Amino acid sequence: MRGERYVVLGLAHVRSSWFRELARWSTTAVLPIEFLQCVSLEELRARLASGRAFSALIIDGGLAGLDRDLADTARQSGCAVIVVDDGRVERDWSALGASALLLADFTRAQLLDALTSCATVIGRGDSVSVGEPAPAAGSGWRGRLITVTGPGGTGASTAAMALAQGLGADVRHGGSVLLADLALDADQAMLHDAGDVVPALQELVDAHRSGVPTTQEIRSLTFAVPDRHYHLMLGLRRHRDWITIRRRAFEITLDSLRRSFKVVVADVSPDLEGEAECGSIDVEERNLLARTSISQSDVVMLLGLPGPKGIHRLVRLIATTVGFGVDASRILPVVNRAPRNPRPRAELTAALAHLTRPITGAGAPVCAPVYLPERRRIDDLVRDGARLPSALATTLAGAASALLDRSPSDAAANGAAFPSIAEPVAVVPGSLGAWHDGAEDR
């Protein structure tokens, strides 16, 4: 083979018989394999990140650390994932990202067939190549995703509650609205006076590390808020718990939420910096919840306050969101605690249009802002767990629905819960028929 062979990484339990057999086949050269044994997940991840070319990863299916994020890391390094299943754990390995499956008593011929079908032969001095992308989530219907964010003190969490309440009252959604707390400093548990902090986001993401729960199982991890007609998913229990959320597991979690609810309203943090902006992969992982949610959102609702500082922070947030890759037509600015007088509102609208014009350039402009006047009893209603003012909920829900209805082609392709609204048609006299009270006239 002129120096070409399969470079295979291996990780298994200490007493796995197939692991010893594979090492013996490699040592005696009965198979064209260079076998590198790993003793821990940390060593395995370090080898995958080393830049060396690997053909495949052969891993014991019973290991607790085998999840979709590890499989995705291997595949991104150009390394096929072959799972050895001993029957102790039942999982959908293909959905998890496995390239091939072997039984614990596999033979040399079966191993060679698996390597031939999914792995690449490595020559001397070959560099690592990018593997095939991880399998995307299956096609099908998904609910709409609306993210709500804003700088601290702008009332973004309360606005997310009001938006979910307004959408939940819409008969088109049938009570299938979820308010998901995806902020780093999660406050929805406190704002809803939740009696417990479990289950929450961490439990839901953990359930997606090694499988895909059913719709019933996903809904069982949320709390019903019947007075406001929506469900609530609690967020991180502590700010530092973001380190427990893995990228691929969270992406599948968000996809599952959209499959289980017609509308998902996500309360997220306004930080979108990643490795490309600041050179730190840790910052990108910390902002994973916001970056993933906003990149997949149908509408991004950005909150700000009136006044020079409030408008400056809102414009800066719009610029950050557009720079992140969000189309300006999907951004809905909201000015909270706005003046009631029409003249100051007109001035704020003109200022926002002038300041955001250089941001969008020749593309579609940012939508006109939605104004929410000051309401003094909001804190009392939140404290008592009562319904928020209908005017507030209806205003936000109507603005978000109108923005969603602007793109009927996208909605139809996605099977969206928001149908496109046709243009009104004039009624011709007599076209609606007639109705009479008397039975003899029917």
Image (cartoon, rainbow, N blue to C red):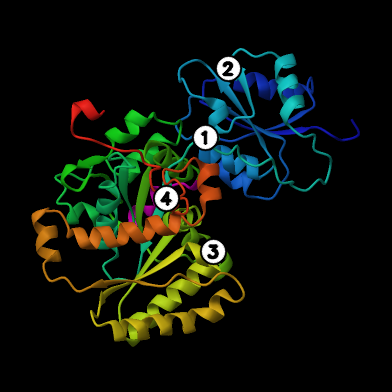
**Residue type indicated by callout 4:** Leu
Q: Position of residue 207 (x, y in %)?
A: 38, 34
Residue 76 can be seen, yes or no: yes
SS class, disc 2: helix
* Residue found at x 45% / y 20%: 89
> Label 1 sits on what residue type?
Gly
Which residue is rendered at x = 69% and y = 21% of the image?
Answer: 24
Q: Sequence-wise, which precedes: disc 2 or disc 4?
A: 2
Mark 1 → mark 2, Cα distance in angstroms: 42 Å
Q: State the residue position of label 1.
A: 140
Tell me the number on the disc at residue 327: 3
Q: Which residues are magenta?
A: 240-247
Residue 51 percent location from the top left of the image: 69, 50
Which residue sits at x=27%, y=33%? 220
- Classify the position of the C terminus by image quarter: top left
Residue at label 2? 17
Q: Position of residue 176 (x, y in %)?
A: 31, 40
Q: Nearer the viewer, mark 3 or mark 2?
A: 3
| In this view, 304 is above or below 89 | below
Asked if residue 90 is positioned above or below residue 332 in the image, the reply reads above
Q: Are marks 3 and 1 in contact (CB under 8 Å)?
A: no
Q: CA distance from mark 3 to mark 1?
A: 24 Å
Nearer to the camera, 184 or 356: 356
Name, please, the residue furthest toward the front. 440
